[in-house]
Image: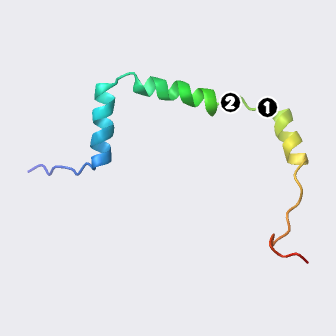
Amino acid sequence: MKQRSYRSEATLFIEQLKAQRPHLEEQQQKGRSIWWDKPQDLDSAEERASAKVPQKPYVYHNA
């Protein structure tokens, strides 16, 4: 006897949304590429790393 697996309301909602809007995932990937997937620039990363100021172990101590 095969037991039915539980699917939460959130999972059912997402599955229904993707069925209604098949282009949604492609739009998500385009949006992600605009805001998050940036090419890494080694020069900028080194510049940011060298500009860091050492932080004291306990930042709220004013001594």
Q: What colour scheme has been applied to the protein in the rendered image?
A: rainbow
Q: Position of residue 10 (x, y in %)?
A: 32, 46
Q: Is residue 7 left or right of residue 40?
A: left
Q: Residue at x 12, y 49 (%)?
A: 2
Judged left or right of residue 55, residue 33 is left
Give the image location of residue 41, x and y in percent.
79, 31
**Residue 49 % position (x, y):** 85, 47
Name the residue located 29 percent from the left edge and 28 percent from the top edge: 19
Q: Which mark is residue 41?
A: 1
Q: How many marks are shown on the rendered structure?
A: 2
Residue 13 picture location, percent across and down:
30, 40
Q: Which residue is mark 2?
A: 38
Mark 1 in CB contact with mark 2 (< 8 angstroms): no
Against 44, is 4 above or below?
below
- Depth order, front residue of 56/40: 56
Q: Secondary structure at mark 1?
A: loop
Q: Amino acid at mark 2?
A: Lys
Q: The residue under label 1 is which amino acid type?
A: Asp
Q: Is residue 52 above or below residue 15?
A: below
- Mark 1, other Cα within 10 Å: few <14 / some 14–19 / many ≥20: few
The relative height of residue 5 versus residue 45 in the rendered view (above or below) is: below
As measured in the structure, the alpha-carbon distance from the residue carrying label 1 to the one carrying label 2 is: 9 Å
**Circle 2: element type:** loop
* Among the 4 quarters of the image, the one containing residue 23: top left
The residue that appears at 33% across and 38% down in the rendered structure is: 14
Is 21 left, or right, of 38 in this rendering? left
Q: Nearer the viewer, residue 63 or 28?
A: 63
Residue placed at 41% from the left, 26% from the top?
Answer: 24
Check the image and name the residue furthest to the left: 1
Compared with residue 63, is residue 8 higher up or lower down, i.e. above or below?
Answer: above
Near mark 2 (Cα within 10 A), the count class, few <14, some 14-19 or many ≥20, is: few
